[in-house]
Image (tube, rainbow, N blue to C red):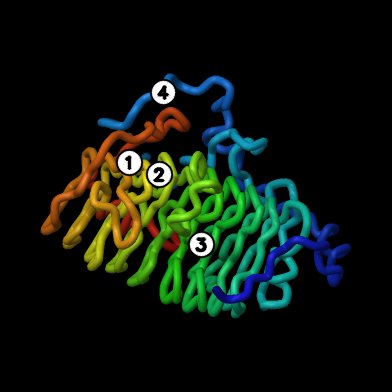
Amino acid sequence: MLPTRTPTGPPRSGRRRRLLAAVSLATALLAPAAPAGAALSPTAPAPPQSAAAGGGAAAPAATADGFASVHALGQNGTTGGVGGPTVTATNTADFLEYIDTVGPLIIQVTGRIAITSKQGVRPNKTIIGVGNAEITGGGLDFYRSYNVIVRNITFTDAEDDAINIGRDSHHIWIDHNRFRGAVDGSVDVVRGADYVTVSWNHFDHSDKSMLIGHSDGSASTDVGRLKVSIHHNFFDNSRQRHPRVRFGEPVHVYNNYFLGNVLYGVASTENAGVLVEGNYFRDVPHPMYSASGYADSGPGRAVQRHNVYVNSGAPETNGTVAEPRNYYPYTLDPAADVPALVIAGAGTGRI
C-alpha cells in the first residue's frame, strides 16, 4: 500500500484563525438540510425481515439517503460541514489544509487539484466541486472519520484508491462524482466502516470500482458492520467490483446501470449479505457471484429481485439477506427506466 496521511494530530496552524472567521451566507445555500432518515430511531427498528421482494427514488436526493441517513453510532444522519464556514480551495496547499481542519467546514473545490497518495479527511466536512472540479493523482482517506459528504468532483488517475473509507469511519455520503483511472479502488469501504451511501456516481471505464471488506481475514472487525447503500450509479464499462463484498450485511445495490462489465457485476463472499434489486444489466456475462464465492473468498449470500438482464448471464443467488427497509425507507424506480435515469442524472454537473 502507498503511504497515507492520516489526520490524527492537531490541524495545521497556517490560516486557522482566518478560516474560522470566514463564516459565509453560502453555508445555508450549499449545506444539506436535516438528513432524510433523521426521524428513524435506532431504539425502535421495524420488525426483522429477510429480503425476498419489493420497493420505489425518483430524482437525485438533495440530502443523504440510504445508510448514510440512518440515526446510529451517535450520529443523526450525514450533514457534512453544515454550521461551519464556507471556504474555496483553488490549489493543493489550501485544499490539504481545509480537509485537515478540526470542526465543520464546507469546502468548495474549483479547478484541478493535484495531490499524492491518500490524504486524510477529518470529520464534519462537505467537499463539493464547483464547475469542473477535479482531484488528480491521489485520493481521499477516511480514518476514524465521520459525517463527511463528497459531491460533484471528478477523480482521475489516483495512484492508489480515489476514496478509501477506512478504519471505523461512518456516515459518509459519496454522491454525483466521476471516477476514472485509479490504480486500485475507486471507492473502497473497509476495516469496520459503516453507514455509507454511494449514489449517482459515474464509474467511467474503471477497473476495481468498489471493494467492501478488504480481506478474508477481517471478520473480527467487519462482521456486523459495512452497511452500505449503492444506488443510481453508472458502472460504465468498468471491469469488476460493483461491489465485491466480504462480511457486510446488508449491502443494498439498487437502481444501478451495469454496462459492459467484463469480469462481473456484484460478488458476495465470506457470508456477506447483498440485496441486488431494480438494476439494469446490459452485456454483463456474470451479473452476480455468491454461492460459489469468488477467487479465493468463500461463499456469500445474495438475493436478486426486479432486475433486468439484457445480453447478460444468469445471476447466481444464495440464501437470504437482512432487509434494508428495516433501516431506512426508499423508493425503487422500475428497472426498465434505470438506463435513462442514470445516464441523465449520474456523475458531475447534475446537482
Q: Is residue 73 left or right of residue 20?
A: left
Q: Which residue is mark 4?
A: 48
Locate residue 267, reporting x and y percent: 31, 54
Q: Which residue is mark 1?
A: 275
CB under 8 Å between discs 1 and 2: yes
Q: Which mark is residue 251?
A: 2
Counting residues from the start of the chain, the first of labels 3 and 4 encountered is: 4
The x, y position of residue 19, in whole percent, is: 81, 63
Residue 249 appears left or right of 116: left
Q: Earlier in the sequence, mark 1 or mark 4?
A: 4
**Which numbered circle lies on residue 152?**
3
Q: Residues within 10 Å of mark 2 (few under 14, many from 20)?
A: many
What whole-number distance in Å separates the C-alpha atoms at marks 3 and 2? 24 Å
Amino acid of disc 4 = Pro
Secondary-structure class at tag 3: loop
Q: For the residue marked with disc 3, what is the amino acid?
A: Asn
Spatial distance from mark 3 to mark 1, Cα to Cα?
27 Å
Q: Are marks 3 and 1 in contact (CB under 8 Å)?
A: no
